[in-house]
Amino acid sequence: MTRKPNVLLVDDEESILATLRLVFEADGYSVHTARSSEEALGMLKDSVHVDAVITDLNMERNDVGLEVARFAQSLRPAPVVMVCTGFANQDNTRQALQLHIDYLVQKPVDLTELKQALKRLLRLRKEKRLRKQS
Amino acid sequence: MMANARGTAQRIALVVHPDMTAISALQGEFLKHGIATIVARDLPTTLLAMTQHYFDIAVVADTISETGDGWALGGVLRMVFPKAFIATITPGSDVHTLKNAINNGIDEIFETNAAFGDVVAATVKSYSSVPGKRTTRVQ
């Protein structure tokens, strides 16, 4: 039996967390949530295994979501890292590009796009891991 | 000699641009850095080149035949050559452009008015300074 992929959702808006939790659980994911970057970093540092992190940018302070993205990318195996923001600007988007995050979606979120991107990225990650093992 | 990504004697760059002047200039600049360059002005030629070479670097215009088709090509290049450094030449660097770059696995964007020498120098520097960096990225 294959395990459900773990997704960590990070957003300071409870309604967004609740909506995305419903959407991703219905799609067969196991969902963890964090209401701040601090909580998310704590979970990641506590070795909560996640296959993907979807983080807001502006929470405790502007662009703090990039710190979550940066830390997530340092994990091994590295999860898929997606940024979901309503406040994309040239500066934080360029920083996200330089960080090599995997995907960026802007709010209001196109759920179909978000789900398809996550599914595709997780599959690519899985195939890459299998290729490494063989 | 068959080329492949990173750690081989001969690095190979792919340049895809609809403008022959740009192609020629970029090819000349890569040559100065000792990098062999395969060039293409259209997508069929690009696909043929991708079947014949393993590219370490790719510099692609954001528009080749149709508006924005260079982004999709960049995404394909990322999947085929996961360790390659891929740059796109675009008219601007607004949020939409940067988002396109991220979501297609592009490493860097350069504005159309950037000097070709600067584009190639920055590309070669970035490629050389982050060996294997691409292995951490999914796309």
Image (spheres, coloured by chain):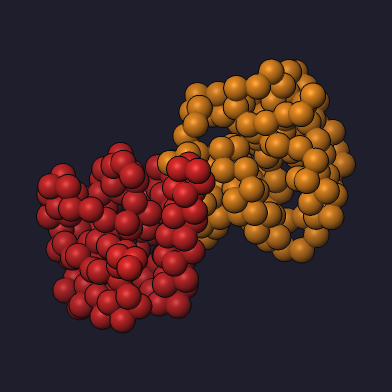
Chain colours: A red, B orange
Query: Foreground residue, A118 or B24?
Result: A118
Image spot of residue B118 (x, y percent) = 64, 28
Q: Residue at x 69, y 36 (%)?
A: B55
Residue A113 seen in this snapshot: yes
Specify whether B94 is left or right of B84: left
Establish if B35 lies above or below A88: above
Residue B125 seen in this snapshot: no
Q: Residue at x 44, y 47 (%)?
A: A129
Q: Quadrant of the N terminus of chain A?
A: bottom left
Q: Residue at x 62, y 43 (%)?
A: B81
Query: Foreground residue, B87 or B52?
Result: B52
Establish if A123 lies above or below B8: below
Query: Foreground residue, B23 or B104?
Result: B104
Establish if A56 lies above or below B129: below
Image spot of residue A114 (x, y percent) = 42, 70
Specify whether A30 is left or right of A95: left
Quadrant of the image occupied by residue A24: bottom left
